[in-house]
């Protein structure tokens, strides 16, 4: 080669080196476009001087810059060009590294099959050249793919292989990365002690090697474990430390991860506004960084936050967006949790059938992934739908399944789920008339909640259920106190739905004590609250309560309008028990309007729903109402049949009350039923049967209440009037004499 050519070659190489250096300088200064231009110029110059290795290096740096600039398809093309340069330069390890990078981008694009092909191609090259470091990288990457697909067994095997190869290569930092990934699987399997130990080891390695980014990631992983173990203080400290470290390094994704974790803690600690701010901040960073998985996780949490706030439509859109992203990136673990949250939103919005399908899908997904926590949440949701739609036996079975799965989670991490199950079972027991079981489940809920910060926001629900229990028993003073406490706690813990339920309970308690004006005012307050929360069910129960006030005021037209409004809402949401109550209430209105045949039709529909839902006291109220019509019509045998069935149900429920002192209060609520039944027996000539019935009642509830009710019936028996024959008046006087004798026997 001539001296002139050698000089020109040397000069061209120097110019290529200079442009390469210009590229590095611009890249380090964040001037991506200038860096790409300089690296591109260097690539051309290196290629012209025949240095294909450096040409490949230049093109690889262009790919890195494009990747940082979120131009992922362009980055793949650049890596492919770099691979061609490395092949010409006979640099197989550089070729393998570019192939590995292509796999990373394909995985980021959720092209998991393409990513897997790239990783396996790189793995083959590394294995051919006995490169332990490269093999560790490929096994780690393959583990991430299987993890993303939800294949925990394969992921574990790949992570273990990665650990072995990194150890062989004396690469402690990447070995710690692989151990951290393995710990994530241990965490998902509920093996928290092993996961904590593994993460702690990784953290120590990162700190020893001064790997600040690894330190942050380890802190985030440790925080997640403590959060799932319901150890909120430890989790908060770790997230706060990670946030501080990530902020100082301008590690934006680390900052977002820490903010998202802190937001979840804030939600669990009932600091809803702070949780909202933190999750929104994280979502903004993920969106700016085009990190789809992070954005999906943030959207899912924001959905849960807005569910608590009662913003159901917005919550629904957020969670559906998260689900679309989880599906797009094939991240099955996030998919299961978000699916269950969507089911909870759908149920709250009144879409029972849709919620049941969503919960079922979520339970199946979670079971396949071994995500027991999500599976238990889904089964609780299934039980809630069954209860909502009046399928009580199915609801009980679903709660049993949830309990069985919950018991497989360590007791240090399942208190919140146990609380939810006990609350659901208590509600089911109250409506099923098994009041002893209801008390037991409520005690179990209180025990599970204990001092557990994660479950503190469930305390209002427990108080509201205690209010419903005492309301059912007839202890209205205790019921009022529990509803009032429930309202105060709900406002303290930012549970607006429970606050509305508590106000509704207060209104119903005032109604039961005939304080109609106060009841109406309170029910109107509950209605406003439910409307703000987009609760169609709650609005239905409010309208139902107002209709019952209208009945007490003998305002039949308004009662009919409000009961029909309640029926419309309950049909819309498939709320079986509410619909039964609404039919019963409309029937009572129609009876008050003397439309007896129409009333009987409503009672028939109510009775069918109560039987289907296994709600005995609803059956009692409906049969009692039907008996009243038969009694008025003089159809005493049919009236007595309805009364007999009602009394049997009343006494069955009474026998489930654990405190005998409450039997008195409970039975007094049904004094009118016993009084009407006794009058029916007397009119049928069954005086001894009537006497026995009343004595049994008085022995438990005392004579005063029943005597007052009998007096009301006496007042309705005419003893004079031109429209009656002499025989009829004499028969009535004889009837009154026998009733008076019965009353005297009770008082004596």
Image: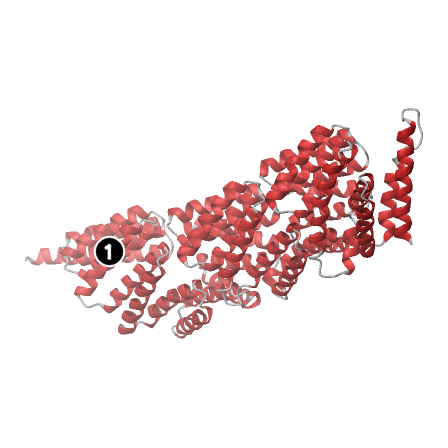
Nearer the observer, 286 or 567: 567
Q: Residue at x 17, y 60 (%)?
A: 91
The percent coordinates of residue 624 (x first, y second) are 73, 41
Q: Residue at x 57, y 41 (%)?
A: 349
Residue placed under numbered mark 1 in the picture: 99
Q: Quadrant of residue 543?
A: top right
Q: Quadrant of the C terminus?
A: bottom right
**Side (left or right) of 470 relative to 151:** right
Residue 369: in sight, yes or no?
A: yes
How many dots with numbers?
Answer: 1
Q: Residue at x 34, y 54 (%)?
A: 26
Local packing at callout 1 (Cα closer than 10 Å; few below 14, some 14-19, many 20+) is many
Compared to residue 179, the image places residue 104 above or below, namely above
Nearer the observer, 281 or 600: 600
The percent coordinates of residue 308 (x first, y second) are 60, 50
Compared to residue 690, the image places residue 370 above or below, namely below
The percent coordinates of residue 20 (x first, y second) are 26, 56
Its colouring scheme is secondary structure
Q: Secondary structure at mark 1?
A: helix
Nearer the observer, 707 or 249: 707
């Amino acid at each position: 080669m001539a001296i002139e050519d050698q000089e020109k070659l040397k000069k061209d190489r120097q110019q290529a080196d200079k442009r390469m250096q210009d590229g590095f300088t611009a890249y380090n200064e964040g001037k991506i476009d200038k860096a790409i231009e300089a690296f591109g110029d260097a690539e051309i110059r290196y290629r012209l001087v025949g240095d294909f290795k450096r040409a490949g290096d230049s093109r690889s740096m262009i790919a890195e810059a494009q990747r940082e600039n979120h131009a992922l398809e362009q980055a793949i093309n650049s890596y492919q060009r770099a691979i061609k340069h490395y092949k010409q330069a006979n640099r197989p390890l550089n070729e393998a590294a570019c192939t590995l990078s292509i796999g990373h981008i394909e995985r980021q694009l959720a092209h998991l099959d393409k990513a897997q092909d790239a990783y396996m191609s790189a793995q083959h090259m590394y294995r051919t050249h006995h490169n332990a470091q490269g093999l560790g990288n490929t096994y780690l990457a393959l583990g991430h793919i299987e993890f993303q697909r939800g294949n925990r067994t394969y992921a574990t095997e790949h992570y273990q292989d990665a650990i072995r190869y990194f150890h062989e290569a004396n690469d402690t930092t990447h070995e710690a990365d692989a151990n951290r990934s393995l710990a994530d699987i241990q965490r998902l399997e509920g093996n928290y002690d092993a996961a904590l130990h593994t993460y702690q080891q990784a953290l120590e390695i990162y700190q020893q090697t001064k790997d600040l980014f690894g330190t942050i990631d380890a802190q985030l992983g440790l925080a997640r474990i403590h959060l799932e173990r319901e150890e909120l203080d430890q989790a908060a400290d770790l997230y706060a430390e990670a946030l501080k470290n990530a902020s100082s390094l301008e590690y934006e994704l680390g900052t977002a991860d820490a903010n998202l974790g802190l937001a979840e803690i804030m939600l669990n600690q009932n600091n809803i506004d702070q949780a909202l701010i933190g999750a929104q901040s994280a979502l903004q960073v993920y969106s700016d960084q085009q990190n789809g998985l992070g954005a999906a996780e943030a959207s899912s949490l924001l959905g849960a936050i807005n569910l608590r706030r009662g913003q159901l439509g917005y919550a629904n859109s957020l969670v559906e967006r998260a689900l679309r992203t989880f599906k797009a990136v094939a991240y099955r673990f996030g998919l299961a949790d978000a699916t269950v949250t969507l089911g909870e939103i759908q149920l709250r919005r009144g879409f029972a059938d849709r919620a049941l399908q969503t919960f079922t899908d979520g339970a199946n997904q979670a079971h396949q992934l071994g995500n027991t926590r999500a599976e238990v949440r889904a089964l609780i949701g299934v039980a809630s739908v069954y209860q909502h739609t009046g399928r009580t036996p199915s609801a009980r079975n679903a709660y049993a399944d949830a309990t069985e799965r919950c018991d497989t989670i360590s007791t240090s991490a399942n208190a919140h789920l146990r609380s939810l199950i006990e609350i659901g079972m208590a509600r089911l027991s109250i409506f099923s008339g098994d009041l002893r079981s209801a008390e037991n489940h409520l005690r179990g809920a209180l025990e599970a909640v204990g001092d557990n910060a994660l479950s503190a926001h469930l305390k209002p629900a427990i108080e509201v259920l205690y209010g419903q229990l005492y309301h059912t028993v007839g202890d209205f003073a205790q019921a009022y106190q529990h509803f009032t406490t429930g309202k105060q706690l709900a406002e303290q813990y930012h549970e607006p739905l429970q606050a509305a339920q508590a106000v509704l309970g207060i209104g119903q308690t005032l109604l039961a004590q005939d304080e109609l004006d106060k009841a109406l005012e309170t029910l109107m307050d509950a209605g406003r609250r439910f409307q703000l929360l987009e609760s169609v069910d709650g609005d239905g129960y409010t309208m139902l309560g107002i209709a019952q006030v209208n009945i007490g005021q003998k305002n039949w037209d308004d009662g009919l309008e409000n009961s029909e409004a309640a029926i419309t809402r309950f049909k819309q949401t498939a709320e079986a028990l509410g619909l039964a109550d609404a039919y019963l209430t409309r029937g009572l209105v129609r009876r008050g309007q003397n439309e007896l045949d129409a009333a009987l039709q409503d009672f028939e529909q109510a009775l069918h729903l109560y039987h289907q839902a296994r709600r005995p006291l609803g059956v009692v109220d409906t049969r009692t109402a039907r008996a009243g019509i038969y009694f008025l019509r003089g159809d005493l045998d049919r009236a007595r049949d309805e009364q007999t069935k009602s009394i049997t149900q009343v006494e069955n429920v009474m026998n489930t009350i654990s405190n005998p002192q409450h039997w008195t209060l409970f039975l007094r609520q049904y004094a009118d039923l016993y009084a009407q039944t006794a009058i029916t027996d007397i009119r049928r000539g069954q005086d001894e049967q009537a006497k026995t019935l009343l004595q049994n009642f008085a022995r438990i509830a005392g004579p005063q209440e029943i005597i007052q009710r009998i007096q009301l019936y006496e007042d309705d028996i005419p003893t004079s009037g031109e429209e009656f024959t002499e025989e009829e008046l004499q028969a009535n006087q004889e009837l009154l004499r026998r009733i008076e004798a019965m009353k005297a026997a009770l008082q004596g």
